[in-house]
Amino acid sequence: MSKKFKILGLSIAATALALSIGIGSLFFGEIRTLMSFKELNDQPFYEMTYHADYGLDEFLESGAATDDELVDFITKKILKGVSFEVNPDGACSTFIATTPEEDDLFARNFDYVPSIGLIVRTTPKNGYESISVVNLNHLGLSVENMPTKNLLNRVITLAAPYAPLDGMNEKGLAIGVLVIKDGIVHQDTGKIPITTTSAIRMILDKAATVDEAIVLLKQYDMHSSGETGYHFQIADANGDTAIVEYINDEMHVLTKEEGHTAATNFVLYNDLNLGYGQDRYEKIKQAQEATNGVMTEEEALNLLLDVPAQGVREVEGSSEGIPSDTQWSCVYNLDDLTLQICTDRDESRIYNYSLK
């Protein structure tokens, strides 16, 4: 080989190496995140540690009034052009309890059709560390289109920080979202707009208490994701909790002092009782009253497993109803900063996490 071709070959190799290093440096956090993706069981359920910058502060400067606007931000900021869809839904139950050792608990069932669950740990530079749970079906993935099927599907999981359905941060602040029939909201008061799941991300990253979470929510115009009504239950390590509902585009905060310590899928504000899940709600309230709100973590989990929302749900894109059941049950200890999660109501599939 001539000297000229040797030099050319070395030059090409050097350029390729520099390009690889440059790309690796540019997407180092994203690559680390995708490499942390791990299967827990064949439900399927996964876990992932997020190492990249998901740009929440940048997002909050302009927000999003629709799912499409949220997707557009994530596609440009995080996914580098890979598109996906957002469509949160589900039944669900939430409640609070206190352990005999006086630790505060937040318990949550996510009830839906068979789903791909993902536990996500995030450590933002300008926010609180948190752990949250995402339904990857809400990001357009499915059993037929798994995150393990190809690289593009795996890349879509990088959108997970903006799709949490429940979670807890390092300050012991927890939140869960639940569907309600008549809670569709599209506020238009001139504030920066925010959608259902991006609001959960904001609260996990920025709020240390229930009061702080409510102050944050009041600073934004709320918009329902997926044209579905929702309400939130929020709890903290001080033992406080609140239910936040949006009725006729007006935000209402229902307090623990008013007796609001649990939620399912009907409107609680002003005893409107619109929706469903009253049977589950009554069973939870009866257990809270019978124990004076004191339960061990095991008892809280058993109560969740005893109040599944089972039935048949109509899902967009399906020509017939799909059987629905509890996809995951979480008990968050807001003092010890631990999560105990049971998937598919199978007690052999219990996983434990800690933020300490």
Image (cartoon, rainbow, N blue to C red):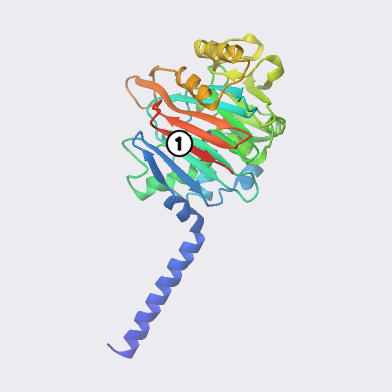
Check the image and name the residue furthest to the front.
101
Residue 154 visible somewhere in the drawing:
yes
Check the image and name the residue furthest to the bottom.
3
Residue 219: quarter of image: top right
Place of residue 294 in the rendered image (x, y in percent of width and height, measured from the top left): 61, 20
Q: Mark 1 Cα within 10 Å, few/some/many (few <14, many 20+)?
A: few
Quarter of the rendering occupied by the N terminus: bottom left
Quarter of the rendering occupied by the C terminus: top right
Q: In this figure, which residue is indicated by the disc labeled 1? A: 351
Q: Which amino acid does label 1 sit on?
A: Tyr
Check disc 1 and report its element: helix, strand or loop.
strand
Residue 180 falls left or right of residue 254 = left
Up-down: is 6 above or below 291?
below
Place of residue 58 in the rendered image (x, y in percent of width and height, measured from the top left): 63, 47
Q: Which residue is drawn at 40% across and 79% down?
A: 11
Residue 248: quarter of image: top right
Residue 11 falls left or right of residue 202 = left
In this rendering, the count of numbered labels is: 1
Residue 64: quarter of image: top right
Q: Which residue is drawn at 67% across and 15% down?
A: 259
Residue 6 falls left or right of residue 29 = left
Residue 186 visible somewhere in the drawing:
no
Place of residue 124 in the rendered image (x, y in percent of width and height, measured from the top left): 60, 48
Foreground residue among 281 and 163? 281
